[in-house]
Image (cartoon, helix red, strand yellow):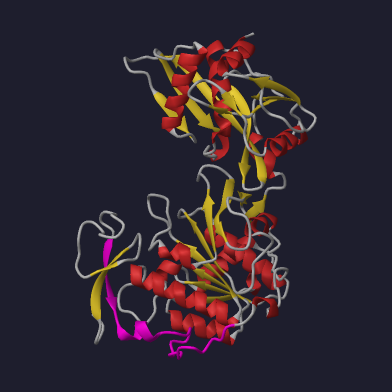
């Protein structure tokens, strides 16, 4: 307990203070989300990045028309996919949060960005609370290039980090990670709710008031979300998730929040022995190694932000060996698969009551948007009849409970990208009206027509 302070219980979901612990937050209703936090008077008066008190009214209102636009002022890292996800590069004075599973490559990505920024003459400070400078040197030697020119600091105390960043001075500060950082203004172990929120807020003020960009690494929970209070994601300007399967070479960098660009943009990287390499043609990255002439395979086009991505969906339907048929989906919500199977059985006339069904989305991609429904059904129909789908065909369409096929958004851009990748035919809703991108478009009213055409 800090001197002259008190202890409160704060909700990690909504940030509401409670005078005592309870199993359920009274504000948002979340269970087991109240965490004890020590609050001291120093935390209440910390108004500047250096901890000194700032009098009320020190900032004066200004007209937006009198402010100089800095929309074009971005620092490009040289990693094309990273810059694309950010919206063109790192914005001065911004705070970016990068989250991901342990060992996915977050530290490698940030060190490569720091090395490329240093090569351009942009001073960077790489702060690690998890590795010593000697360990960082080993990583730099493995990455090669200009990684040895990075200014490295092994420190977890926020006040020391801000002092060194200002003394350097650094234009970009990379902190690995926010959960290992603590401030002397609060008591409590690094990583607790109060420390994470206060350190993030102080770093935000440091970035906005003095100009350098700050990039934070965040740990993730077993549920996949960034550890710490949800307010952490509200404080920062950009939230990126680094995703991928440990058994695969590809890594996806996804923007879920971006004040300076589009959300849901993704960048594709390949993990190599010398670090991460941007994939030259990410739209076709997940079709590499695709086998043609095999039943149960269909291709669809996803929209990841503003970029169309082609993915292969594989399905296998076999006679059930036990009383209850299995329903296994990888990369697809199993509840959505159950709905599509029910619609295909009722509206398409294909019985699945005695069949085990397995659906897999290649490349570790997860299907979220409903525009992939038609491709899933096409793969299932192909597997049941054991007839391969033509290799140059792409499927776009949402399937309703009545078996109708509905148009999808941005169909023109998906078709154009499919044409660039060598596809010549597209199955989609008969209500589609627009440019076809040079593809032969086959309009479908319902899934019964799809089953009839693929079985012919």
> Residue 11: within the magenta?
no
Residue furthest to the right: 438
Q: Main secondary structure of the magenta part?
A: loop
Residue at image location 31% in from the left, 66% down from the top: 16
Residue furthest to the top: 456
Q: Is residue 449 above or below residue 369?
A: above
The foreground one among 64 and 117 is: 64
* Quarter in which the C terminus is drawn: top right
The answer to whether residue 299 is seen in the rendering is yes
Task: Pinpoint residue 276: horizontal percent, then vertical percent.
Answer: 62, 54
The foreground one among 224 and 455 is: 455
Answer left or right for 456 relative to 11. Answer: right
Task: Pinpoint residue 447: horizontal percent, then vertical percent.
Answer: 56, 18
The foreground one among 17 and 56 is: 56
Rendering quarter of residue 334: top left
Q: Is residue 368 above or below residue 263?
A: above
> Residue 47: within the magenta?
yes
Answer left or right for 328 relative to 210. Answer: left
Give the number of callouts. Answer: 0
Rendering quarter of residue 138: bottom right
Task: Pinpoint residue 254: horizontal percent, then vertical percent.
Answer: 56, 52
The answer to whether residue 141 is seen in the rendering is no
Task: Pinpoint residue 319: horizontal percent, then vertical percent.
Answer: 43, 12
Residue at image location 72% in from the left, 30% down from the top: 433
Q: Which residues are magenta?
A: 34-61
Rendering quarter of residue 122: bottom right
Residue at image location 55% in from the left, 39% down from the top: 365
* Quarter in which the N terminus is drawn: bottom left
């Amino acid at each position: 307990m800090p001197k002259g302070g008190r202890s409160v219980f704060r909700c990690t979901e909504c940030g509401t203070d409670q005078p005592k612990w309870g199993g359920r937050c009274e504000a948002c209703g979340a269970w087991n989300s109240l965490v004890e936090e020590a609050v001291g008077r120093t935390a209440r008066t910390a108004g500047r990045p250096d901890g000194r008190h700032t009098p009320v009214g020190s900032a004066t209102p200004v007209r937006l028309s009198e402010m100089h636009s800095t929309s074009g002022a971005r620092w490009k890292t040289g990693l094309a996919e990273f810059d694309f996800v950010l919206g063109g590069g790192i914005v001065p004075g911004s705070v970016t949060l990068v989250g991901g599973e342990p060992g996915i490559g977050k530290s490698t990505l940030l060190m490569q960005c720091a090395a490329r920024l240093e090569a351009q003459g942009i001073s960077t400070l790489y702060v690690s609370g998890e590795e010593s400078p000697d360990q960082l040197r080993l990583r730099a030697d493995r990455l090669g290039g200009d990684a040895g020119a990075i200014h490295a600091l092994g420190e977890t105390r926020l006040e020391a980090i801000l002092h060194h960043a200002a003394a350097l001075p650094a234009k970009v500060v990379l902190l690995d990670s926010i959960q290992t950082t603590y401030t002397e203004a609060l008591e409590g172990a690094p990583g607790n709710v109060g420390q994470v929120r206060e350190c993030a807020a102080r770093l935000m003020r440091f970035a906005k008031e003095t100009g350098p960009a700050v990039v934070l690494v965040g740990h993730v929970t077993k549920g996949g979300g960034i550890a710490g209070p949800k307010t952490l994601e509200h404080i920062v300007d950009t939230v990126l998730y680094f995703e991928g399967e440990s058994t695969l070479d590809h890594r996806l960098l996804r923007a879920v929040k971006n004040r300076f660009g589009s959300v849901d943009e993704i960048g594709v990287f390949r993990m190599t022995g010398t670090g991460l390499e941007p994939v030259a043609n990410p739209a076709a990255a997940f079709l590499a190694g695709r086998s043609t002439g095999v039943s149960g395979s269909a291709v669809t086009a996803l929209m990841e932000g503003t970029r169309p991505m082609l993915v292969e969906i594989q399905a296998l339907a076999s006679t059930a060996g036990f009383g209850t048929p299995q329903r296994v989906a990888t990369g697809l919500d199993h509840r959505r698969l159950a709905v599509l199977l029910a619609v295909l059985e009722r509206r398409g006339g294909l019985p699945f009551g005695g069949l085990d069904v397995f659906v897999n989305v290649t490349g570790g991609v997860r299907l979220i948007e409903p525009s992939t429904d038609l491709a899933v059904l096409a793969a299932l129909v192909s597997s049941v009849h054991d007839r391969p789908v033509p290799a140059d065909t792409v499927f776009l369409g949402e399937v309703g409970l009545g078996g109708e096929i509905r148009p999808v958004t941005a169909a023109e851009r998906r078709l154009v990208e499919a044409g660039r990748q060598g596809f010549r035919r597209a199955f989609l809703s008969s209500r589609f009206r627009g440019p076809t991108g040079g593809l032969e478009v086959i309009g479908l009213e319902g899934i019964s027509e799809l089953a009839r055409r693929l079985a012919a």
